[in-house]
Amino acid sequence: MKTNINFKIELYITWISEKVLLNSLFLLTLFCLSGQTVLQAQEVNYTKPSWYFGVAAATNYSFYRGSTHQLNSSLTPPVTFHNGEGAGLYLAPLIEFYKPNTRFGFMFQAGYDSRKGSFDQKTSPCNCPADLSTKLSYITVEPSIRIAPFKSNFYIYGGPRLAFNLDKSFKYSLGTNPAFPNQEATSEVSGDFDNIDQTLISMQVGAGFDIPLSSQKHKTQFLLSPFVNFQPYFGQHPRSTETWGLSTLRVGMALKFGQGSKVETQEVTEYPVQFSVNAPKNIAGERNVREVFPLRNYVFYDLGSNKIPSRYKLLQKENVKDFNEDQIGVTATVNPSGRSERQMTVYYNVINILGSRMIKNPSTTITLVGSSEKGSEDGVAMSESIKTYLVTVFGINASRITSKGQLKPNIPSEQLGGTKELELLREGDRRVSIESNSPELLMEFQVGPDAPLKPLELVTVQEAPIDSYITINANGASQTYSSWSLETTDQDGLVKVFGPYTQEKVSIPGKNIMGTRSEGDYKVKMIGTTKNGKIEEKVTTTHMVLWTPSKTEEGLRYSIIFEFNKSKTIAIYEKYLREVVTPKIPKDGVVIIHGHTDIIGEESYNLNLSLDRANEVKSILENALSDSGRKDVNFEVHGFGEEESTSPFKNKLPEERFYNRTVIIDIIPTK
């Protein structure tokens, strides 16, 4: 019982001393923060510190294991002590270094490290209770590697522990046999353990969490960090004799401070943002679209294979006579705000379309150029797979087809020195290009090896055209806001959130806001974050009508396909835009031009790139109309970048990404 009482007394004393210490830390923290409140009004921002200094205080919970018998040369108890535990004080100044928003840093602590405690009471041969306690303590030096795995305030750390013995004293007592209550007890013996190692080398690991006590408006910034640390028994055998070892769990808190550097902020001029919502009346009208669908002269191959991918439609020889390219894209519903799987089905028939056209035009010839990162030999094998198919299935004379191989395509996606998204770029470069000088196979007004194949004309029913979208104008937002979002609330209180956005004009399909509701009054709130970090809200109300079909009207659609990262229209398209597309624009018509990109590259860059492409096409059409004396056409230009909800195709396969590098031209007749 004496051991338990002594242990409780020691715990109580340790608790009192640590409570006083933590109260002192708390008062010091309040003092430091109160000293900074004067600086708050200066509204000066500082960086987060890289160097921190402070103090750590904790309780060491030590667990004794092993055997302790001979205490020193003059005292050997009649019993051997084995297990024990105790609570001691840890107090150390500290230094930390880590750059803000990084994972790795360095920590260093050196201070007082108590491992005091009591062994479990033993009973001697005389049936007398024997007790042993120690005030074992060290000066400890603990350098650590600091890791913030999520670049957040949570961190883990670990490293060696170098301990120098400071106190090796013990107290030993032998009680009396309870069967002889009048027996005189022996005196308590105090002394020092012998064979104590003066230096220990062990290890320690831990975790902590930094709680900021001051903002970045203060040059001197404080952190309060609760932490837990574990030191296993490896290397922690206090004596060079016997088997006494100990493991320690340390639980505590650190107060740290550091100084940031003044942030030189440029004065941000805030411009008034003009917020408005345009909800078209959306008079019901089904729009048939006669689409000229471009046919890219590429067949893309899977990495590691020189066989025609299974996604491309291949025919049996007996089915060739029934193949008709005009019947591939039969009339079907196409939603331009989603992805058009039907159009990709047309594209995956490109080899069959090529074979059918070569049968109808027996004088035409082609060259198949395979581009492979493995070299020209693999490129030839890719080309030969298409040639073999055309010869064996479509019966094309082999002399009309030339196969070649090379390392890179003539217009590669992967650029020299590039380091980002290389796998996607290489998927796009592993392809067979269909080259020809036969006009019967090629797009109008275009010749040469880079010319696309002659397009197909498809008749589709378009749902929710772009001119039916809800348009939000936030004029001045790009100058004032770092970003802004949109919140719509219907008559039933249902709230939907859109964004964040950085551009000044956003178009949202009415169905995304309204769902199946045919019409209704909506509250539209714009929530902007200024470049100074302030939140601004602007609210308006508008009546929305969902676009629904009822009567027929026909529009035209043309597409321009761009090579990787090219914002200027391919030169061979200008004549096509002038002489094919422009004459199809009716008097007083509306031309809606929307640009898109694939997902390769930064989102903000792609947004600007798509708008550049759309404006280039608009410029060519406007100039062509002006040359013929026409100024009756209204243009709408949109750049959607890689926006998922509006991209024409998916971005999973290289074919889809190539078709997403596009400008789509919708020609709408006067209503």
Image (cartoon, rainbow, N blue to C red):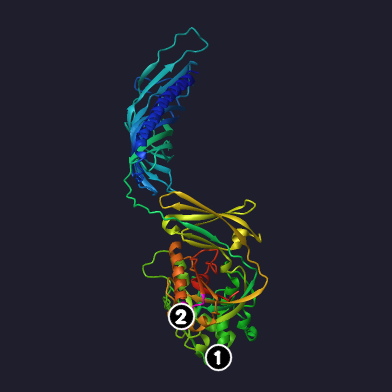
Q: Secondary structure at mark 2?
A: helix
Q: Could you tell me residue 245's position as x and y percent?
A: 42, 32
- Say which residue label 2 marks: 626
Q: CA distance from mark 1 to mark 2?
A: 38 Å
Magenta span contains residue 630: yes
In the image, 134 versus 573, the foreground residue is 573
Going 55% across and 92% down the picture, which residue do you hit?
Answer: 362
Q: Secondary structure at mark 1?
A: loop
Q: Could you tell me residue 339's position as x and y percent?
A: 57, 68
Q: Residues within 10 Å of mark 1 (few under 14, many from 20)?
A: few
Magenta span contains residue 340: no
The stretch of residues the image draws in magenta is: 621-633
Going 65% across and 85% down the picture, which residue do you hit?
Answer: 322
| Residue 361, numbered label | 1
Q: Could you tell me residue 610's position as x and y percent?
A: 46, 68
In front: mark 1 or mark 2? Answer: 2
As drawn, 159 above or below 328: above
Q: In the figure, is residue 616 to the left or right of 395?
A: left
Question: Quick one: which residue is furthest to the right in this view?
Answer: 550
